[in-house]
């Protein structure tokens, strides 16, 4: 079976695939045009897909009838039309758990960076504007005893909530499709309605899987309901927030600051005015960018494909219903 890997990943997964007898193809030039990418997909049986640039939708599946399995090098699967994959009996693997700590670390980092205006102060240092001690300039806010609101309390949200509680004794509220009993028992997390979450969070952190119907859910209306001291953190998907509305909320004092590891659009334009703001910290989607997490993702992606080849269920499958067909 021929597996197309569109970008180099940590060796561990590649070795596992080769040891299992799979033919692995990684192009020399990883900056593929859409047509190049598509032609490699057409001549392969399975894809180990790295990054969110490529869409696996009806057109893709129609054009690549040979594809029998997709192993994503990500936990998110918003770039895959799961219904189409199910109809064609194509299992789609993903990489949960191994990146939960790393991604929540970035949410925690952004929360603190914004609370203490780290980007703004670093910029002052870099531009030779350290200045003299000023008791009133660029004051941050402390997080002790404040309320963290988690939108989507799954594995990553749980890790974020755990850290916030341990470090700052924060109260945890959350909104989900389902109750998270582990979080309620271990962290005393309280399930609230979406409106309560928005209105009561001092820090609002998004950790949900993105669905098309949630596009720009966090817009002017929602920012308008948040607390003026609130910090908005998005490490999930840029599509969750309306970026111009966020800019407006940040400049008009509707909210206090924002920490973004994901942007809308992504990558962010370098002249996006949000980058000029002193109450913002933006990172280039580095949530899972640790040696440990990326090795783990490489291993899980390989395990998913190897299971498929053996005729077994993928151990981490984004569309487990495919096995009921
Ligand atoms: C994920 O795993 O979904 C990360 O956001 C990287 O795409």
Image (spheres, rainbow, N blue to C red):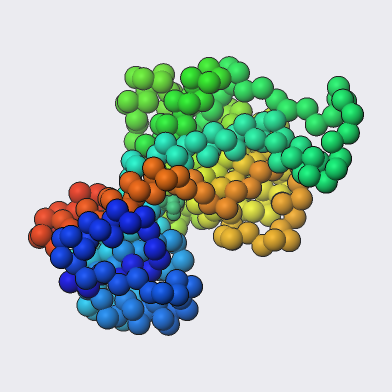
Residue 62 visible somewhere in the drawing: no
Q: Position of residue 10 (x, y in %)?
A: 36, 55
Question: Would you place residue 4 above or below residue 320 in this image?
Answer: below
The answer to which of 194 and 114 lies nearer the viewer is 114
Image quarter of residue 15: bottom left
Q: Where is residue 279 in the image (x, y as percent from the top left)?
A: 73, 40
Question: Would you place residue 103 above or below residue 247 in this image?
Answer: above
Residue at left offset 10%, top offset 60% = 311
Image quarter of residue 109: top right
Residue at left offset 55%, top offset 44% = 234
Q: Position of residue 148 (x, y in %)?
A: 54, 28
Q: 82 left or right of 286?
A: left
Question: Would you place residue 11 above or below residue 6 in this image?
Answer: above
Residue at left offset 54%, top offset 33% = 108
How many marks can you see?
A: 0
Residue at left offset 66%, top offset 43% = 281
Q: Where is residue 280 in the image (x, y as percent from the top left)?
A: 69, 43
Q: Quadrant of the C terminus?
A: bottom left
């Amino acid at each position: 079976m021929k597996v197309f890997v569109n970008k180099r990943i940590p060796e561990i997964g590649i070795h596992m695939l080769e040891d299992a007898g799979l033919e692995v193809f990684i192009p020399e030039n990883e900056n593929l045009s859409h047509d190049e990418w598509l032609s490699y997909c057409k001549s392969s049986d399975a894809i180990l897909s790295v990054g969110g640039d490529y869409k696996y939708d009806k057109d893709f599946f129609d054009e690549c009838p040979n594809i029998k399995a997709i192993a994503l090098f990500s936990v998110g699967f918003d770039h895959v039309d799961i219904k189409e994959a199910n109809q064609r009996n194509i299992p789609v693997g993903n990489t949960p758990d191994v990146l939960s700590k790393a991604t929540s670390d970035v949410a925690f980092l952004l929360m603190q960076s914004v609370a203490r205006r780290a980007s703004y102060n670093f910029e002052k240092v870099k531009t030779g504007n350290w200045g003299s001690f000023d008791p009133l300039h660029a004051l941050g806010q402390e997080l002790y005893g404040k309320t963290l609101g988690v939108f989507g309390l799954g594995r990553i949200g749980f890790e974020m909530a755990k850290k916030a509680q341990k470090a700052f004794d924060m109260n945890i509220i959350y909104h989900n499709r389902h109750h998270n009993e582990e979080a309620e028992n271990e962290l005393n997390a309280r399930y609230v309605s979406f409106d309560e979450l928005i209105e009561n969070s001092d820090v609002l952190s998004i950790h949900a899987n993105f669905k098309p119907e949630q596009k720009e859910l966090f817009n002017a209306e929602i920012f308008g309901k948040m607390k003026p001291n609130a910090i908005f953190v998005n490490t999930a998907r840029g599509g969750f927030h309306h970026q111009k509305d966020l800019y407006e909320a940040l400049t008009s004092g509707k909210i206090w600051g924002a920490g973004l590891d994901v942007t809308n659009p992504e990558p962010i334009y370098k002249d996006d005015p949000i980058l000029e703001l002193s109450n913002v910290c933006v990172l280039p989607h580095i949530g899972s960018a640790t040696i440990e997490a990326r090795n783990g993702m490489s291993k899980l992606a390989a395990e998913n494909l190897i299971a498929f080849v053996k005729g077994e269920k993928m151990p981490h499958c984004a569309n487990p219903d495919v096995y009921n067909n």
